[in-house]
Image (cartoon, rainbow, N blue to C red):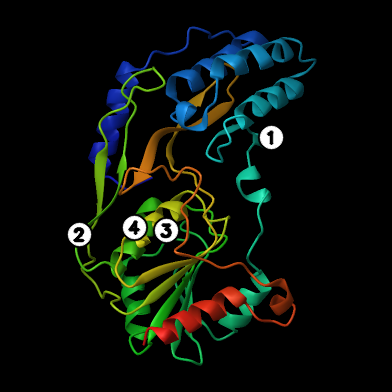
Amino acid sequence: MKRFPLFFILYSLFFISCIREEPAFTSNTKEGNFEALWTLVDQQYCFFDYKGVDWDAMHAKYQPRAAGAPSTAALFDVMCEMLAELRDGHVNLSYAGEMGRYWEWKENYPANFSTDLQQKYLGTDYHIAAGIKYRMLNDNVAYVVVNSFNDGFGNGNLDYVMRNSMLATGMIIDVRNNSGGNLSDAELLARRFTDRERLVGYTMFKTGIGHNDFSAPEPEYLKPANGIAWTKPAVVLTNRACYSATNTFVRDMRECPNVTVLGDTTGGGSGLPFVSELPCGWLVRMSTSPMVDARLRHIEFGVPPHIVCPLDSSLAAQGIDSMIETARQLLKNRE
């Protein structure tokens, strides 16, 4: 993630690497790999207390199963089950042929999204600016779709979108089902909606191997972009599948003037990830640095909308996206 300048991130990683103790378990055996995984997570994961996870209890629960695993595949499954106890989509165990993942953060919630409906509102003659799709709806509302923050757009693309939407009375930014990507791209977009530097949150960095060894909260500020700004009303559409960088984008947009977040609570995913390797070569990724909002509230389990608005299934069957229509009405009322 790229919220902070590159030199600051490199310095932080170097500093952290100097103070963290490497696990003592380095043997490429079932026991050694299990202990290496458990120890890495024990020393570096950042949400134990917030989530109420007793990691020592997880060791007692899963160590016998790991020791008795009849195959490499079975050992991998046991380790993935243990990691799932963290309830964190940023925690993965992977190798060339498999990736363990935790998706219950979105699977147990309504989708509140239809790809077909989104495409219906975009039509076939929409504009494309790198990873951004947009068009003017017939009520003079700009409808902007950002499906991923991995598609790579820059300030030139954003200037183009803002310039072509200049005559619109309002803007809808649809980030539903955007699972994240490059945090710097998310910030580039959010900067178009603030009129001044605004405090949007804080990040705490790991300073030791203890569960609560963190730095003092480092403030994060959203600064106005040098390019064309959006000063009219805007609505951000969210659902539970908004994760990681999109979760942070929604956090930041809540602090911007004239912006309303409408939909469902986002999926969360607020810990900056760290990657390490087990003796067998498997890679483990985990959250190590918690990010919170401007009031120091955790956003790991999601950012709530200003207005809760589900997708009406009966209207969806008629080709109507009730969330988009609610946003259009909200913008009309603010004219």
Q: Are marks 3 and 2 in contact (CB under 8 Å)?
A: no
At which x and y percent is residue 304?
47, 56
Q: Amino acid at mark 3?
A: Val
Which comes sooner in the sequence, label 2 or label 4? 4
Q: Label 4 to label 3, Cα distance in Å?
A: 10 Å
Q: Amino acid at mark 4?
A: Glu
Q: Label 2 to label 4, Cα distance in Å?
A: 13 Å
Residue at image coords 43%, 82%: 331
Which comes sooner in the sequence, label 3 or label 2? 2
Quadrant housing the C terminus: bottom left
- Residue position for label 4: 187
For the residues carrying marks 1 and 2, which lies nearer the camera in this image?
Answer: 2
- Does dot 3 land on a helix, a strand or a loop? helix
- Residue position for label 1: 97
Label 1: few (<14), some (14–19) or many (≥20) C-alpha neighbours in 10 Å: few
At which x and y percent is residue 52?
52, 27
For the residues carrying marks 4 and 1, which lies nearer the camera in this image?
Answer: 4
Which comes sooner in the sequence, label 4 or label 1? 1
The correct choice, above or below, for 210 with respect to 254 in the image is above
> Quick one: 239 or 289, which is closer to the camera?
239
- Residue position for label 2: 197
Q: Amino acid at mark 2?
A: Glu
